[in-house]
Amino acid sequence: MSRVGRAPIEIPKGVQTKIEGNVVTITGPKGELRREFNPNLTVEVKDAHIQVSRPDDLKYDALHGLTRALINNMVLGVTNGFKRDLEVEGVGYRAELNGKNLVLSVGFSHTVTVEPPGGITFVVDKTQRVFSVEGPDRETVGEIAAKIRTIRPPEPYKGKGIHYLGEKIRRKAGKAGKVGTGAK
């Protein structure tokens, strides 16, 4: 039996839950999230808790835990929201906001503009080196952060590029040069 799936999800104050068949809608101070789940699993509200159950112990074990984790992320997202921090590293590299859009100068002959999808906001630090992607949906926040990172991934020699804050970049040694080759 799934240990994660059996755990009830507490509904905090200010959060409304609506369940219509296999569609769960959760509304809170940070927004509204709606998701459709497998019809073989049962999602119900009992005493200010959300409980996910499945018809038998043999099937849907992993799906049981996944469904519970996704609903828990929805509850956390509409109450606290999710945030992913990224850092721009390199000479002349910077990030800035133009309205709601994120404008990146990362060594190309042009700037790169990233438009946020619905519910996502960008916050840029005053140093213009660190910025974050914020929103209520954990999956979307992670996906947008990953897409921004692919614009200019960190290179292994000097570490220039866009990387997650605190990410360890594996470095390579540069060229060895003409040391001890005995060239004549």
Image (tube, rainbow, N blue to C red):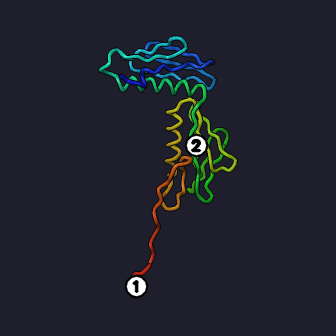
What's the amino acid at mark 1? Ala
Question: Disc 1 or 2, which lies upstream in sequence?
Answer: 2
| Residue 14: assigned label | none
* Residue at the disc numbered 2: 85
Q: Quadrant of the N terminus?
A: top left
x then y, percent, for residue 133: 58, 39
Question: Secondary structure under badge 2?
Answer: strand
Q: Is residue 114 above or below residue 176?
A: above
x then y, percent, for residue 96: 65, 47
* Residue at the disc numbered 1: 183
Q: CA distance from mark 1 to mark 2?
A: 50 Å
x then y, percent, for residue 46: 50, 11
Question: Secondary structure under badge 1?
Answer: loop
In the depicted view, which residue is nearer to us: 78 or 9? 9
Q: Is residue 114 above or below residue 57?
A: below
How many discs appear? 2
What's the amino acid at mark 2? Asp
Instruction: Name the residue located 60 percent from the left edge and 52 percent from the top edge.
Output: 105
